[in-house]
Amino acid sequence: MEQVLTFFNDNREMIYFIILSVFVGVEVIGGVPTVLHTPLMSGANAIHGVVIVGAIYVMLNVNPTDTVALILGCLAVLLGTLNVVGGFVVTDRMLEMFKKKK
Amino acid sequence: MKQHLLEICYLIGSVTFIFGLKMMGNAKTARNGNLIGAVGMTIAILGTIFLHTGEVAPMIYAMIFGAIAVGTIIGWMTAKKVQMTAMPQLVSIFNGMGGACAALISLIEFTHHMHSGEPATTGTLIAIIAGLVIGSVSFSGSMIAFLKLNGNMNKPVRLPAYNMINNVFMLFVLLFGAYMVYSGGSLMLAYALFASALLYGILFTLPIGGADMPVVISLLNSFTGLAAAFGGFLYGNKVMLTGGILVGSAGTLLTLIMCKAMNRPLSNVIFGAFGAGSAAAEGNEVKGTTKEASVSDVAVLMNYSKSVVIVPGYGLAVAQAQHVIHELEMLLESRGVSVKYAIHPVAGRMPGHMNVLLAEANVSYDKLVEMDDINPEFSNTDVVLIVGANDVVNPAAKTNPASPIYGMPILEAENAKNIIINKRSMSAGYAGIDNELFYNPKTSMFFGDAKKALTELVAELKTMD
């Protein structure tokens, strides 16, 4: 019990932050027309590519002699970049189709 | 100083994510919304690299930039080159990459904590283990979803009692993760957990039918969001937290909305996949005779009708027939025939997929009519032309409680005066069930590849007049 309380107290700000973000996420999606579901999913997919920030952080703090960590970190940055770049570009291509045409 | 600037970068990133997602909810602002998100992401990434405090070897910078460069080129090229029809599986791949990235971060961090000798706090361990498990499940699940959508794995694979096995295995992975947090674990155990989570992702996705893949991708999408959020928790990184949680919660809601469009609860998608009961499939065999129509039959019928409704399906997209169908539409319109498209919420492979495909062929936005608006109009429609669609017009969804798609809202094409169905053969639809609409006395089958058949139809129509 005490551990749980300490945990809560140590991470109080984070927990507030998380709960509020959940509500923002739900609010932001509300009332979206069906036609936009696919681009929206794809756009959200690009945004979670923000995990690349973590991968870069790992690389910046890694011990340069730790080869395994270097290789895995490098791979993580590569995969994260794929997620971000591919995600945004493919979403843009989808949304390009929605622009007004005569 | 640098640290403060970095925090501002992250704040900008977080705000652009929220605004971007909000703008993507409206067709007019959607494209800019996506761009704003991309700009925010770039700021967050550049900030992370250039506002870092502390000594970093130049070699490491080189490795980071190298990885980013390679990733950008591959990601950009693939996203630009892919056919619009193959988009859903591409989204699935990119999603898997994000999941794998999160899992690798956790693996490195765990190893780091093992080597450093200082015990990690409970919060840190939870974040690492949760990121590892969720990221891995998302990765392997997305890969299976990709294979299924890409047609490499057509039939859902079901082990005997797969629901039981999956649930027990899920419980095992969860308990394993909890034990790792409790005990602190070891490197060997971390790799074992990594492997178990990967295996669970495969087991979880395997039994789910291809028609339900969009829902699964959306769900896995929110999983990756969650994994990113745990990464953010681990580093106290606000931009990862906002981005991750936004996608986590928005993705979960989107998943539920998609399920609602198909009128099936999420649990039904995950546990009671299409065709799960073989009895249902057997009871579904429809017997009867079909009528076949030639190109000239169809051309005459359409030329002298007042109103035509086109029901486009995935078959149209696969045959790349969206441009021809637009030509047909314009030709008929020039002869005074009113033409509309009836769009089922899940036409194509994902909600909204068909709209994107038709928009690509310049079909005017207001010609696309959504299901609830078009259904009352079918009884006044002279001809309904169904191109490569099957399950979305199957009356069994309304009439046959034993049918696996029972309860799914459909386009009531059977109410039209004449029904023309263009298909390559008599094979069943994606859900693998027979369609009694084919045997309706009002129905004529117009066999052939959608693009070829429609091109012939357009040519035939041009000779008339």
Image (spheres, coloured by chain):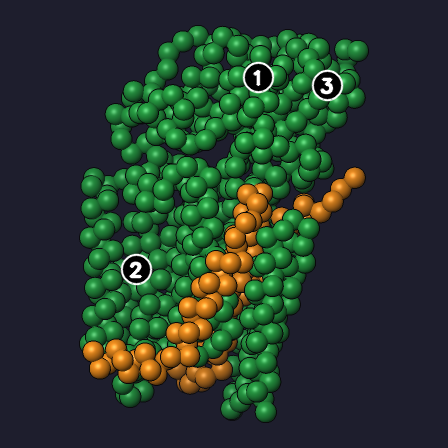
Report the residue at 55% width, 79% height from top. B48
Report the residue at 47% width, 77% height from top. B237
Q: Which secondary structure lies at badge 1?
A: helix
Q: Which secondary structure lies at badge 3?
A: loop
Left or right, B260 with respect to B277, comes to right
Q: Which residue is mark 3?
A: B337
Q: Is residue B349 above or below residue B101?
A: above
Q: CA distance from mark 1 to mark 3?
A: 16 Å
Left or right, B86 with respect to B394, comes to right
Find residue B52 and report its horizontal and vertical position in percent. 54, 85
Q: Earlier in the sequence, mark 3 or mark 2?
A: 2
Residue B379 marker: 1
Q: What chain is the orange one? A: A
The one nearer the camera, B389 or A65, is: B389
Q: Earlier in the sequence, mark 1 or mark 3?
A: 3
The picture's colour for chain B is green
* Crowd rating for badge 1 (residues with CA inside 10 Å; few <14, some 14–19, many 20+): some
What chain does mark 3 sit on?
A: B
Q: Amino acid at mark 1?
A: Ser
